[in-house]
Image (cartoon, helix red, strand yellow):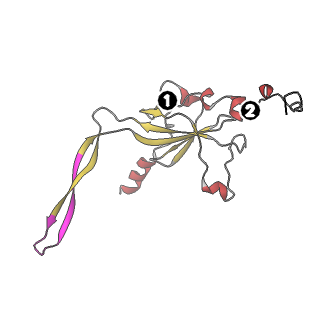
Amino acid sequence: MTDETLPPPLFDLDDFDPAPSPLRLLGAPTAFPTLPSRWDGDVVRWDDWQELPLSSVEFHGKSYQCAACGTAARPYTSLGRRQPGTGEVFEVIRRHKTIRSRWGKSYRIPVYDHATAWPVIQWIATRCGWCGLTEVVDLDSDETWILDDTDYGPDGSRRPEDTPHPAALALEDLTP
């Protein structure tokens, strides 16, 4: 068959434009305000936005739905690492020392040392690609925060004065 005997194509591939994704319609997550560079005074480094991976929960009927706009589109996520302060150290186990009792039983005892602190993942941010709702989960306190305009200032996000940190509440419960 030659080109003259072929039927004409149904559409021209040069004109074909696949349906745009919601993020192309509204902008990528980076089109919304950047995440706060400080959180309660600590310096934070955020990863690039990535689409939230599919979990097994969604296979069992519980799919994600944005609390603000109700879309079922997959949100985007970013991990926030707390940068260590100057001179901050972690207590780490360097090795184990073996001790033998006089009856011949051996025990392994950890030997602790101090190491220069490294960045620690402390926050997980999710952002809806449709409406821009941004929630941040604090992995230390298990609190979820919905970011608003006050969180995007030069000082970053701060805990409201009337909301004590859960660690402070736990200490109050322990004191007689």
- Kind of residue at disc 1: Gly
* Residues drawn in magenta: 99-113
Q: CA distance from mark 1 to mark 2?
A: 34 Å
Nearest-to-viewer mark from 1 and 2:
2
Contact? badges 1 and 2 (CB < 8 Å): no
Q: Tell me: 51 left or right of 43.
A: right
Q: Choose between 118 and 70: the one closer to the eye.
A: 118
Front residue (pair 1, 123) = 1
Residue closer to the observer: 126 or 141? 126
The disc at residue 147 is none
Left or right relative to 70: residue 159: left
- Local secondary structure at mark 1: loop
Q: Quadrant of the C terminus?
A: bottom left
Res 117 quadrant in image: top left
Residue that badge 1 annotates? 156
Q: Residue at x 59, y 44 (%)?
A: 52
